[in-house]
Image (cartoon, helix red, strand yellow):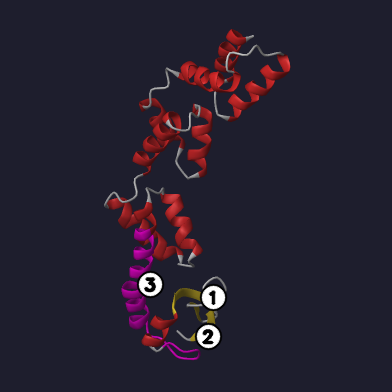
Amino acid sequence: MIITDIKTQAKNENKVSIFIDGKFAFGMEKSDCSFMGLKTGNEISREKYDYIMDNTIYTKAYQKADRYIGFKMRTEKEVRDKLKEEDYNEDIIERVIASMIKYKYINDEAYALMYARDCKNIKKWGPQRIKTELYKRGISAAETNKALEELDISDTDEIIETLLEKRIKNTPIDLKEKQRHFNFLLRRGFNSDNIKRVLNKYC
């Protein structure tokens, strides 16, 4: 295996991309590259390549992911996307993800329930908006449905009423205003039937 190129990364001037036999192999810190004695044109043995991947690249990738989830709970997709941004290859990313799932540092099922509960209680979102946002974060349909089943959504009408009370403040509304409030509640993720039922009380 021959190191055919070493390029400073555009997004981070402290990191370089290493190309072996004309193909991107991995990214690493410039300081690590110098320490390892990696230079364009040099031959790199399989033993040294494996050592770099296991003891430098994987370790740095894991530390990056660990810091990322240290700020708040993240989904598997969010961690994967973060590592891709840092130009780690698929093999390293999969190893990091597998380890974090094994030790419950990544737990999409728990994330889905926590996120759904916060969106309902704090943001006052309806089920459909919660589903959409969980989908964006890579949560599966099965995990999303399970979270919503565990979450008590029997008080949907009460939440809609609370939102309307803040907007209407007991002032009579005409059809134009009714449509505006209807669209607002749809964007919040509530079912149209629930919205109509509650809105009719005010019209």
The residue segment tinted magenta is 38-67
Quadrant in the rendering for residue 166: top right
Q: Tell me the amino acid under the disc marked 3.
A: Ile
Q: Which residue is mark 2?
A: 4
Is residue 49 one of those drawn in magenta? yes
Q: Which residue is mark 1?
A: 9
Calculate the distance from the C-alpha at mark 1 to the C-alpha at mark 3.
16 Å
Q: Residues within 10 Å of mark 3 (few under 14, many from 20)?
A: many
Is residue 176 one of those drawn in magenta? no
Q: Residues within 10 Å of mark 2 (few under 14, many from 20)?
A: some
Q: Residue furthest toward the right? A: 176
- Badge 1 vs badge 3, beta-carbon distance below 8 Å: no
Q: Earlier in the sequence, mark 1 or mark 3?
A: 1
Of the two numbered discs 2 and 1 in the rendering, the one whose residue sits closer to the viewer:
1
Q: Tell me the amino acid under the disc marked 1.
A: Gln
Give the quadrant of the N terminus: bottom left
**Image location (x, y in percent) of residue 171:** 62, 14
Q: Secondary structure at mark 2?
A: strand
In the image, what residue occupies the spot 60% across and 18% down?
168
Q: Secondary structure at mark 3?
A: helix
Q: Secondary structure at mark 1?
A: loop
In the image, what residue occupies the spot 58% across and 8% down?
201
Q: Nearer the viewer, residue 87 or 163?
A: 163
Of the two numbered discs 1 and 3 in the rendering, the one whose residue sits closer to the viewer:
1
Calculate the distance from the C-alpha at mark 2 to the C-alpha at mark 3.
19 Å
In the image, what residue occupies the spot 65% across and 11% down?
172
**Image location (x, y in percent) of residue 25:** 47, 75
Q: Which residue is mark 3?
A: 57
Judged by its main secondary structure, the magenta piece is: helix
Q: Earlier in the sequence, mark 2 or mark 1?
A: 2
